[in-house]
Amino acid sequence: MGALKSEGQKGFVAYIGAGDPNLEATEQLASALDEAGVDILELGVPFSDPLADGVVNQLAAQRGLESGTTPGKLFSTIRSIRQKSQIPIVLYVYFNLIHRVGVKEFIEAAQESGVDGLLVLDLPPEESENYELVMKQAGMCPIYLIAPTTPEERIRQIVPRASGFIYYISREGVTGMQSTISNSIDSMTATIRKYSDLPIAVGFGISNPEQAREVARKSEAIVVGSAIVNQIAEHGSSPNLVETVKEFVRKLVIATKSA
């Protein structure tokens, strides 16, 4: 993401639920999204209690669990992805899954499989010293979230600990598609930039090319999740799933890059 920023290009982060509808589809979608121009692939690791997610992504997590997706099976799939694609991969994961495996064991397994970074939804920075140390040793990026409700003093504490990029959640509440973009983006990204030179990726609610272009003008990158996951939900049983999703995302990427 830093290379894109230095070249003055906008980045596009695509989120999909791992194992939705199955891990074979995840592997195919990863290659297709790379071909569509996606800069970073964010894979949601299925979890039974995804508190930060709206209905669309909750159902994706449920489908991932029903397809038998575990962290171990996902790591195997990522190894397969790496044989065809070098797209940067970030795992969107709840800490319970990491804790169950063991922090060091999970991070090392993720790194060995080809994962580039982790976005741990529910790990407060104050409790993440061991996690950050192991991440640094593994050469992986800890991605941190900033919300519209995050006070400036807390932003000052959080963002220097991040690497890769800062993920600004542009709306309060859970993930989901929205009809309008947030009006907090300008002021919050300006505050974040006071304390970090990392690229800022803005997500939560972007669902069409017009919104993608508008948000990309205000940030270094955008994140689209629920809108893509919704396409997978609608076409999951179709033989044209991968091509349909690829074309949907390609239009969003073009809009983002033209901002």
Image (tube, rainbow, N blue to C red):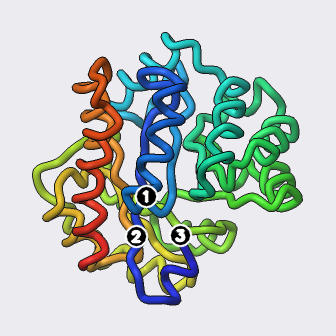
Q: Which of the two labelled residues, at mark 2 and mark 3, occupies the earlier sequence position?
A: 3
Cβ atoms under marks 1 and 2 closer than 8 Å: yes
Circle 1 residue: 13
Report crowding for label 3: few under 14, some 14 to 19, many 20 or more residues within 10 A (C-alpha): many
Circle 3 residue: 155
120 vs 150, nearest the viewer = 120
Q: Please tell me whether residue 212 is drawn above or below residue 68 in the rendered image.
A: below
Determine whether the residue tagged by mark 3 lies in a helix, strand or loop. Answer: helix
Q: Which of the two labelled residues, at mark 1 and mark 3, occupies the earlier sequence position?
A: 1
Give the spatial CA distance, label 1 vs label 2.
7 Å
Frontmost of labels 2 and 3 is 2
Circle 2 residue: 221
Give the spatial CA distance, label 2 vs label 3.
19 Å
Determine whether the residue tagged by mark 1 lies in a helix, strand or loop. Answer: strand
Mark 1 residue type: Val
Give the spatial CA distance, label 1 vs label 3.
22 Å
Report crowding for label 2: few under 14, some 14 to 19, many 20 or more residues within 10 A (C-alpha): many
Mark 2 residue type: Ala
User: Across the whole image, how many numbered discs are drawn on residues?
Assistant: 3
Report crowding for label 1: few under 14, some 14 to 19, many 20 or more residues within 10 A (C-alpha): many
Q: Residue at x 68, y 46 (%)?
A: 83
96 vs 256, nearest the viewer = 256
Mark 3 residue type: Ile
